Image (spheres, grey):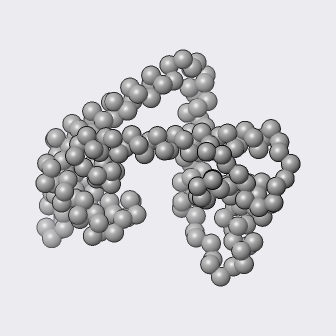
Amino acid sequence: MTMKPLGPPDETSADSESAIFLVDSTVELLRALDASRHRSASGLGISASGLRVMSRLADSGLLTPSQLSESMNMTTGALTAIGDSLAAAGLVQRNVHPHDRRRHLLSLTALGSARMAELYREFGVTLTRSVERFSQEQHSALASMMIAMAAALNARAAAPEPDPLLPADAKSLAVGGDTQGANPSSWATDEGLLL
């Protein structure tokens, strides 16, 4: 896949070529992670969304359905259906809320915890093997870049949506883009916008 800036072409610099390479590489990694998630979910006999639910519960422990649906940007109805299928598979359980018996908390079962631990172990081994040939300094640089990219994406996700009534050029500026296309966050792929 080749990235291209939105807007009129401008002079290509080493910095913009480096940024394009970084974006292309990141998109490829995200696609590989998605394929890996689908493979792992299939191995458990669940959907990729079910695996996302299990991952959140593995990270957080007990969550109410509303906390889980909000953190995953899902409707409570969709989460209920996923939770039901995970419970039927013996991977997730509903626990009575300690302060309100009308509510419940979701958590992984012992089987669900064991399955997630095995998936995390396999994932860690795969990633560790993939970077064995690189130096410790390169590992540290990669980790620092990934943390910085994650922070930027989290900040972007938390930013308020631009006003839909603003003119198009004002909208691109409101989300950190530029009308000349020099900002990598405003780039598109051959397959569509990369947002």
Q: Where, by quadrant of the figure, is residue 83 drawn? A: bottom left
Question: x, y percentage for residue 158?
Answer: 54, 61
Q: Is residue 46 above or below residue 14?
A: below
Picture residue at 80% right of the left edge, 38% below the top: 14
- Residue 69 rendering spot, x and y as whole percentages: 33, 63
Q: How many marks?
A: 0
Residue 130 appears in the rendering: yes
Which sits in the foreground, 166 or 104? Answer: 166
Q: Residue at horizontal 25%, vertical 59%? A: 82
Of the 4 image quadrants, the one containing the N terminus is: top right
Whether residue 148 is visible here, answered yes or no, is no
Identify the residue at image location x=27%, y=35%: 117
The residue drawn where x is 54% and y is 60% is 157
Residue 182 image-quadrant placement: bottom right
Residue 65 % position (x, y): 27, 63
Q: Nearer the viewer, residue 56 or 87?
A: 87
Camera-side residue of 153 and 37: 37
> Is 49 located above or below residue 131 in the figure?
below
Quarter location, residue 17: top right
